[in-house]
Structures are given as structure tokens and as C-alpha cells.
């Protein structure tokens, strides 16, 4: 772990974090379309004044789309992503989310440890298809995954 990641804390994102979150997503070549500048339902992990990672939810009643799970390249492999995922799962449960979905082009092998399994896109509730990620921010080749939080 780097010195920064050892002192890292997870907290709810604020609007002031938006530029840092967009920068992390762009550096990781992840979509920013549909990302609200208020970052409602987002968490960040920070050390000092630096945002080292982020993850968010788009909530659609009892279902939600997990989006924008990202950690700064120099901080990967130190457990920050896992901490963020565990915390966002807790947050989703507290919001009454029973089913969590995601799209990924690069991390299909990483998410199963958090209860996610690959599904067909047709199994994703219609409401989630209104999200920017389903409308084209993520390519058609992106893998859909689901975790039951109930």
C-alpha cells in the first residue's frame, strides 16, 4: 500500500469531488455520460486532499445500477476498490435496493467476489435501460452482471 492508501477514508461524495471523479473515470477510460455533477449516491475514497477512487449508484426503486467503480491506477491492488464496493453495497441496502446490476468491459472476473454473476442484458429491468450506460455510454459488448441484496 502507498502512504496515501494507508490513510484513506471512504465518505459520501460531494459536488466539489466531481472534477476529480471525472478525471479518474477518464483516466480509466470509463464512461462519464449521465454522471450527475451532484454525485448523489456516490462514495469516494480519499487520502488528504486527493480522491483516490469512487463508485456510485443510479437507483430505480428496488433496483439500482452500480456505476463508475474506479481507483486511481497507482492505488490499484491495495484493496481500495474492495472497500468501496463493500461500502456501496451497504449504501444500496440502506436505500432499499434489492437487486444491483452493472455493466463492465474490463472487470467481469473481479465482481463475483461481491456476489455478482453474469446475466443477459435482457434480464436487466426495463427501468435501468433508461440510464446513459445502457443507452450507449457502455458498448454493446459490455457484460451485464447482477447481485441480489435481498
Image (cartoon, rainbow, N blue to C red):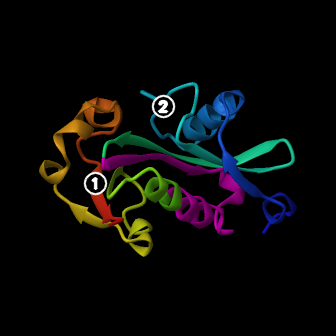
Q: Would you say 59 lies left or right of 118 here?
A: right
Residue 57 % position (x, y): 45, 44
Residue 33 % position (x, y): 43, 27
Residue drawn where x is 57% and y is 33% of the image:
39
Q: Which residue lies furthest to the left in this view?
A: 122
Residue 17 % position (x, y): 69, 33
Q: Which of marks 1 and 2 is nearer the N terminus?
A: 2
Q: Which of 148 and 117 is in front in this view?
A: 148
Q: What stretch is highlighted in magenta?
A: 62-88
Q: Nearer the viewer, residue 106 or 4?
A: 4
Kindly state the secondary structure of the residue where label 2 is placed: loop
Q: Report if residue 128 lies within the magenta region.
A: no
Rendered view: 125 above or below 4: above
Real-space Cα distance between discs 1 and 2?
18 Å
Which residue lies under the disc numbered 1? 143
Which residue lies under the disc numbered 2? 32
Rendered view: 7 above or below 38: below
Amino acid at each position: 500500500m502507498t502512504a496515501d492508501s494507508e490513510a484513506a477514508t471512504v465518505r459520501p461524495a460531494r459536488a466539489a469531488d466531481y472534477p476529480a471523479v471525472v478525471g479518474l473515470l477518464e483516466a480509466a477510460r470509463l464512461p462519464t455520460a449521465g454522471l450527475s455533477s451532484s454525485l448523489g449516491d456516490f462514495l469516494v475514497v480519499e487520502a488528504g486532499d486527493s480522491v483516490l477512487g469512487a463508485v456510485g449508484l443510479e437507483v430505480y426503486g428496488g433496483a439500482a445500477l452500480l456505476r463508475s467503480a474506479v481507483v486511481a491506477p497507482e492505488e490499484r491492488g491495495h484493496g481500495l476498490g474492495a472497500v468501496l464496493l463493500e461500502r456501496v453495497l451497504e449504501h444500496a441496502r440502506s436505500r432499499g435496493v434489492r437487486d444491483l446490476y452493472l455493466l463492465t468491459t474490463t472487470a467481469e472476473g473481479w465482481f463475483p467476489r461481491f456476489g455478482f454473476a453474469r446475466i443477459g442484458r435482457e434480464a436487466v429491468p426495463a427501468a435501468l435501460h433508461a440510464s446513459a450506460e445502457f443507452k450507449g455510454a457502455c458498448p454493446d459488448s459490455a457484460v451485464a452482471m447482477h447481485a441480489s441484496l435481498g
